[in-house]
Image (tube, grey):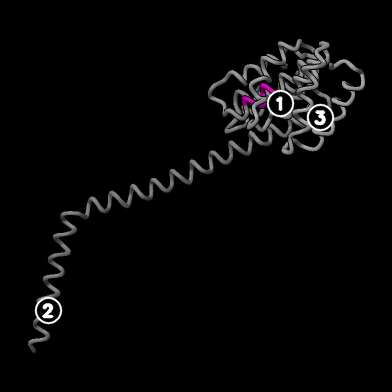
Amino acid sequence: MSDDSFFREVNEEIRQEQAKKLWDTYGPWALALAVLVVLGTAAFVGWEYWTTQRANRSGDAFSQALTLANEGKNDEALGALQQLETDGYGAYPLLARMRAATVLEAKGDTAGAVASFDQVAADSSIPAAIRDMARLRAALILVDSGSYADVSARAETLTGDTNPLRHSAREALGLSAWKEGRASDALVLFEQIAADNEAPRNNRERATLLAELIRGQGTAS
C-alpha cells in the first residue's frame, strides 16, 4: 500500500469516528430540531388557512348584510350585523357595529344610531381614526335631531386645523348653529371651510353658498 493510500484510509477512519462522536453528542438534538421545524411549519400553515377561512366567512356575511340593508330589509340586516359583531373575525365586528348604527338611522331610530356611534367613539380599544369618524357620524345625525350643544359635544374636538375631518365637523357645527339662529357663529365656520384650500371642493362650494346666503339675509352682523 502506498503512503498516499494509507493516509487516505487513516483520514477516512478519523472522519468517520468524528462524525460518529458528533452524532452521538448532537444527533438527537438535531433530530428534535428538525421535528420541531416540521411541526412549526405545519402549525403555521394550518393557522394561516384557518384565519383565511374565518376572514372569508366574515367577509361574505358582511356583504350579505350590506345587500339586505341596500334592499331596505333593515331588520334582517341588523340581525346579520349583530351576529357578525359577535362571531366576526378581524375588522368585521367593528365594521358591523358602524354599519348597524347607519341602519338604525335609516330606520328612523336616530337616538339608537347616535348611541351606537357614541359607544364606538368611547371605546378606547378602537383606533382613534375610527372613533373620530363615529363622533362625526353622530354629530351629523344630531344636526337635524339635536341641539347645537349636542353637535358641539361630538364635533368640536374634530375642528382643529390638522384634523382630516375638520371640514365636515365645521360644516355640521355651522349648520347646527344656523338652525338655532346663531348666524354669526355659523358664518365664521362656513368661512373657515371656504378659505381652507385643503377642503374638498364640495365642502367649499356648500360653505361658500351658505356664507353668501347668511350675508344676504343680513342675519350675521
* Residue 121 vertical placement versus 47 (above, below): above
Q: Looking at the image, is mark 3 or mark 1 nearer the viewer? A: 1
- Quote the CA–CA distance across marks 2 and 1: 79 Å
Q: Which residue position is annotated with label 1?
A: 99
Q: Which residue position is annotated with label 3?
A: 70
> Toward which corner of the image does residue 178 lie, by quadrant?
top right
Q: Amino acid at mark 3?
A: Asn
Look at the image and give the residue range highlighted in magenta.
Answer: 131-136
Q: Amino acid at mark 2?
A: Glu
- Residues tagged 2 and 3 counted as in contact (Cβ below 8 A): no
Secondary structure at numbered mark 2 = helix
* Residue 85 vertical placement versus 44 (above, below): above
Q: Position of residue 153 (x, y in %)?
A: 67, 14
Q: Left or right: where does residue 19 sit relative to residue 53?
A: left
Q: Position of residue 79 (x, y in %)?
A: 71, 21
Q: Amino acid at mark 1?
A: Arg
The residue at the point 68 percent across, 32 percent down is 61
The residue at the point 16 percent across, 54 percent down is 25
Q: Which residue position is annotated with label 2?
A: 9
